[in-house]
Image (cartoon, rainbow, N blue to C red):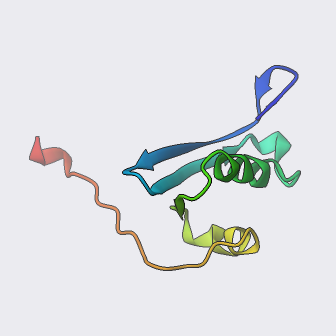
Amino acid sequence: MTENRKITSGAVAIRYGMSDIYITFVSTDSSHRHKGMAAKVIRHIISQNPGRNVILMCEEKLRDFYTRLGFVHSDNVYLYTLREESF
């Protein structure tokens, strides 16, 4: 999403197989938050992918926001970081 030709909100959407789309890294510039921009971005992605299962990955603290958009918590994702000494 842009305003005055500057990016204000966006997300990464990845199609996987024939039926799934994964949405992650939803972000809005701090000066544009609480204006519904992230919700518009999510709805746009969904509208461009009719019939696909939409899987959203987000931080725990944002669960209520995505629940209001119609998402249902279904599983936890575990993140791992490679130790530097492993190189």
Horizontal side of residue 8 vs 49, given as left or right = right
Horizontal side of residue 2 vs 85, given as left or right = right
Task: Work out whether residue 64 or residue 16 is closer to the camera in this orientation and state it.
Answer: 16
Q: Name the residue: 49% across, 53% down.
A: 21
Tell me: residue 82, above or below residue 71: above
Quadrant (top left, top right, bottom left, bottom right) of the N terminus: top right
User: Farthest top residue?
Assistant: 5
Residue 39 falls in image quadrant: bottom right
Residue 56 falls in image quadrant: bottom right
Q: Name the residue: 74% across, 68% down.
A: 69
Tell me: residue 67, above or below residue 52: below
Residue 44: image location, x then y, percent: 72, 46
Q: Name the residue: 42% across, 75% down.
A: 76
Horizontal side of residue 8 vs 77, given as left or right = right
Residue 77 falls in image quadrant: bottom left
Quadrant (top left, top right, bottom left, bottom right) of the C terminus: top left
Residue 61: image location, x then y, percent: 62, 71
Task: Work out whether residue 66 or residue 16 is closer to the camera in this orientation and state it.
Answer: 16
Residue 15: image location, x then y, percent: 45, 46
Q: Name the residue: 45% across, 57% down.
A: 19
Residue 51: image location, x then y, percent: 57, 59
Number of dots carrying numbers: 0
Horizontal side of residue 3 vs 54, given as left or right = right
